[in-house]
Image: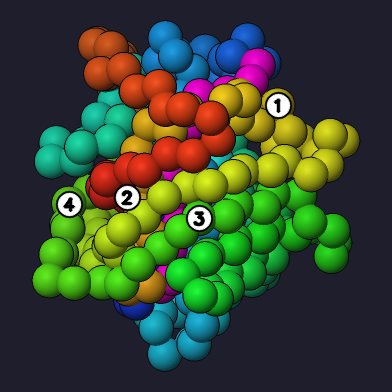
Amino acid sequence: MLDPAAPQLVVNARVLQFSWLPADPDAVAAILPAGLQARSDRQVFLCQYVVDDECQTSGFGAYSLTYLGLSLVGMNPPDGDTPGGWWSHYLASSPVVRQYAAARGVPAAAGQTVLTVRGGQLTAETRVDGRPIIRTVARVGHTGHEVRSGHHRYLTGCGGELTSADYPYVAEPVSPFEIESVEFLDPDHPVYPLRPANPLTIGWGFYSPRVSFAYPAGPHALDEPPTAEAAPVHQVPARRARSGLPSGS
């Protein structure tokens, strides 16, 4: 088992990440533990990614991962342009990754994520026990000369206390990028309360075939309460949303 306090590096992962407004804001808010405050719009984030080769990690090996959670008030990282978030679900294909994450307070469970791109259309599917539970479809272009970097902040609960860590990243986003649909396919799965509203309202998002990031040493105990509300997301028509690139990994 990897030391959960030790940092880990991942390079050139294929990553889809974005956020939305939920269909059931009250159910989303109920997921948060005491001491954390959801945004007033109850924004939810989703990341679906694949690490294709063991040579791309410092110790995880090849794996795929889907995680979801809630965006928080007053927990933004110092140089990030997306709000900090609470990890509510974390579905990893690798037992090594699950054990490492669980020891850090992450709600790790088994799952598989598959990303395919055909003719400019990206399909990202998350499966549990071979059963699809989330499917995202997006239009994607090509990487250019743009590179984004920074940190994203995630909170967990470990040893009976809230903990926080800032995750550095470097990403090469594609352009254009447009979310076309997000389907939650299993009403009985615990992720279902986080499903998006219809029409779909996107807060931020990106796809990149090359994202590098680190799980930092730690995490450390949260010693300051949330202080300020984040900026609101924007409404978009129908079930399509074109979006820019946030920080994240």
Give the camera-side residue of 182 and 213.
182
What amino acid does circle 2 point to?
Gly
Crowdedness near tag 2: few (<14), some (14–19) or many (≥20) residues, C-alpha within 10 Å:
many
Let me know if residue 62 is in the magenta part: no
Dot 3 corresponds to which residue? 138
Dot 4 corresponds to which residue? 150
Residue 193's disc is 1
Horizontal side of 192 relative to 162 (left or right) equals right
Let me know if residue 18 is in the magenta part: yes
What amino acid does circle 3 point to?
Ala
Q: Quadrant of residue 64?
A: bottom right
Helix, strand or loop at disc 3?
A: strand
What amino acid does circle 1 point to?
Pro
Can the viewer see residue 149?
Answer: yes
Q: Name which residue lies at 64% across and 20% down.
A: 23
Q: Quadrant of residue 208?
A: bottom left
